[in-house]
Image: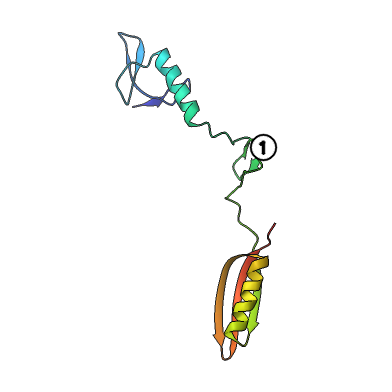
Amino acid sequence: MTRPCKYGCGTELGAFDEENRKYLEAASGGLHTKERCQEAKLKLEQKNNHGNEFIAHETKKATVQFPPNAEFVDHTLKPELILKTLTDPTPEGIDLKYNNFAKEHKIRYSQSHVLGSQYTVYVWYEEKQ
């Protein structure tokens, strides 16, 4: 049975060595000394230092703090999409309407239908900021 080091270095510890009065590391089998613990803590801090973790972000579980950074983008947020229906009786006309609309809006999805002589395109977009 293993357990993590109580000093937060992230090392899994195995059995206790009575002779040396130290725990054995589960992965390497070596003694878990104070020096090895401090080295493991430094490596763990360097590994977990992403540099961009102090801007407040509310989640369902907790509030996480991230650093203020103008370039930070939360990719987990879903944009509010707006639906626009474009129609025209000619293929060239619907192409022109779609392309002009795309110049002014950020199109995320679109779907087209032809019914008789009427061309229809449904466009889901988000406002450009």
Q: Could you tell me if residue 9 is visible in this image?
A: no
With respect to residue 34, does 99 lie above or below? below
Q: Give the image location of residue 102, x and y in percent.
A: 63, 68
Q: Residue at x 37, y 17 (%)?
A: 32
Q: In the orientation shown, which residue stands out farthest toward the bottom?
A: 116
* Other-residue count near label 1 (Cα within 10 Å), few / some / many at <14 / 14–19 / ≥20: few
Q: Give the image location of residue 49, x and y in percent.
A: 53, 31
Q: Residue at x 29, y 21 (%)?
A: 29
- 67 or 21, which is in the foreground? 67
Q: Residue at x 66, y 42 (%)?
A: 70
Q: Amino acid at mark 1?
A: Pro
Rendered-image quadrant of the N terminus: top left
The type of colouring in the image is rainbow
Task: Give left or right: position of 22 versus 56.
Answer: left
- 18 or 111, which is in the foreground? 111
Task: Give left or right: position of 12 versus 59.
Answer: left
Please give the count of numbered marks on the rendered protein. 1
Q: Could you tell me if residue 79 is visible in this image?
A: yes
**Quarter of the image holding residue 80?**
bottom right
Q: Residue at x 61, y 71 (%)?
A: 123
- Asked which secondary structure carries label 1, the reply is loop
Name the residue carrying label 1.
68
**Quarter of the image holding residue 25?**
top left
Q: Give the image location of residue 27, x and y in percent.
A: 32, 26
Rendered-image quadrant of the C terminus: bottom right
